[in-house]
Image (spheres, grey):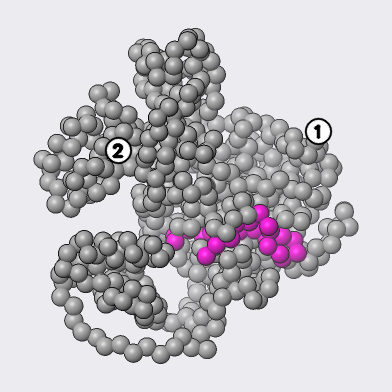
Amino acid sequence: MGKLTVKSGRGELKLVKSKKLVGLKSKKAKDLTKTKYVEKEHFKNLGGFQVVSLEDDGNNVDDQLDQVRKKRDIELGTHVYYAEGSNKPLLPTGEIYIIFETAVDEEELQIVLDEYALELVERRGDDRIIAKVTKNSPNPIKVANYLQQISLVKHAEPDIDTLVDEYISLPSDTLIKQQWHLKNDGIIKDAGYPTKKGADAKVVDAWNRIGNIGSSKVTIAVIDNGFDLTHPDLRDKIFRPWDLWTRSSKVSEGDPFFTHGTPCASIALASANGRGIVGVAPNAKFMPVSGTSFGLRATENMFDYCIKNGADIISCSWGSTDPRYTLSLLKEEAISKVAREGRNGKGAIVLYAAGNEGLDYINFYAAHPDVIAVGASDSRDRHSRYSNAGRELDVVAPSNGDWPLIAARAYWDEGTTIRGEGEWRWWADGQSRGDNYKHFGGTSASTPLVAGICALMLSANPDLTAKEVKDILRKTADKIGDPSEYSSEGHSRKYGYGRVNADRAVAEALRRRDGSQPVVEVEENISSGRGLFRFSVERQASEGWGVQIGAFAEYGNVLIQAEKLQRQFGEPVVVNINELNGKTVYKIVIGTFNNKEDARRLMNRMTDRGVRGFLRNLKDLK
């Protein structure tokens, strides 16, 4: 079958149409598995469609789908695709995100919509809209490709959904019920297994410091699949649950393919009820948001729900490291929005797992600058070999690697067949610690662990912003591993800024609450200096084009970045001084060109050297 090319994130996907699978959306939520034309359901929800194979009638999939679309109980039908070289199904939702050139007027915009029989769904500003295909449109992937060839359109991207990876690592060694990640005494007692004393997250010390186990006013949202809301460690703390696909508070349960959310949530907030395990922040409220998705619209929906319903912290142990599925600008904006607008403007704290593929780069969601990216360390304070590394990694937290954690188990969890039958399905040593629990690990475990620490920090100081929480976690982390692996800025690709230390993080949160925070924070290694800078200052006219790389709160960082960028690209650096939420911010723009195309050429050159930026009209920086 022919191949299609579609924009995805900052790259492109080459798609191959499935010869067997199609996506169907029924009227009145009809169960299509009971119809004569559906052979088998493969995925219940992907982009809002049921992914099914059709009964073989001797025709090819194109003809079969055309026939099914005509049936009275079918609202929509679409082809299913695969990215070249991938076995993950990919499905267009029917919506297209379109960014027009700045000068396009309303009449020209409507001409474009009419040309492809598109329906306007939502406006996102003067130059951005969301449109959807109608029955008279070509398929959304083709439409997006057609739009991209029009001079009026700057960017057109179809909303597509695919399966995201759930970050869990099967324990390979024996485990006992002692939760060493909270406090590590140097031995797993019922196995006689030696660990490294103190190789833990210092959670018990943090509880002692604040004199409690966290506040019930803090809400942790866990976005995942497979929540057992009847579990004794979770059922008494559920707050505003939501299912992405049913769009209701009725959260899907019982599917053996989805069990991941239950252990993730328990690591963060399992109740202190005198039985089983206890979470890092056992008093926190639990907001289960069921339904992970790669889709643009679904991504916006899940984070918008968290904003509107009071999530303070959002823990995500899933994502993608497949280069074909990088984040689009619109997904990046969805994450930025919740990190900016959540918690009534203080920003919701968003955490993502770095991933378990053992790569030298991390999950694309985790690499977002507003996200806390979490990797894994083991019970001896070593890097867990499966844990992805990269420059965007913020911290690591205890998980398996040599000794796993204990977590809650969904009642329908069938376990794994990798380790054998019986209790080996859930327990690495075959010894049961109770039907409600299992071995668990990977960055899936370390991420909610840090989410729980964030809840303790907000319990100590509710006024912390999301940015401050991230900053505190970095600055209070313990440097583990070989010191030579850390840069002069204190960062390691394997460990981030170190292994989290809940006690130090809570102490810093309390210090800032009590008003003892210094006006200017100094980095630990700043005493050696950052060099001398010679510069001259002159006024820049508010005209022309350049490439903006970001905004900075500290003038020292502006000097460091300006010197580096001028040396790299040989172009003048323009700094705009402005106010944001009562604070001074500095926007850095590289180049002062008379026309936009010259600026675009610089931006492409910067992109090739790993420096991200966007075109900026200098008149907008008055």
Residue 70: x and y in percent read 35, 13
How far across and down, in percent of the image, does residue 277 sit? Answer: 72, 49
* Residue identified by numbered label 2: 144
User: Is residue 375 rendered magenta in the image?
Assistant: yes
Which amino acid lies under the numbered mark 1 shown in the image of this protein? Glu
Local secondary structure at mark 1: loop
- Residue shown at 21%/61% (left/top)? 597
- Give the main secondary structure of the magenta stretch: loop
> Where is residue 406 shown, x and y percent of the image?
73, 49
The residue that mark 1 highlights is 421
Q: Is residue 547 above or below residue 232?
A: below
Q: Which amino acid, by three-letter code, is at mark 2?
A: Ala
Residue 194 in sight: yes
- Helix, strand or loop for disc 2: helix
Magenta segment boundaries in residue numbering: 369-391
Quadrant containing the N terminus in the rendered view: top left
Quadrant in which residue 24 is drawn: top left
Foreground pick, 205 / 4? 4
Whole-percent x, y for residue 225 in the image:
56, 38
First reached walking from the N terminus: tag 2 or tag 1: 2
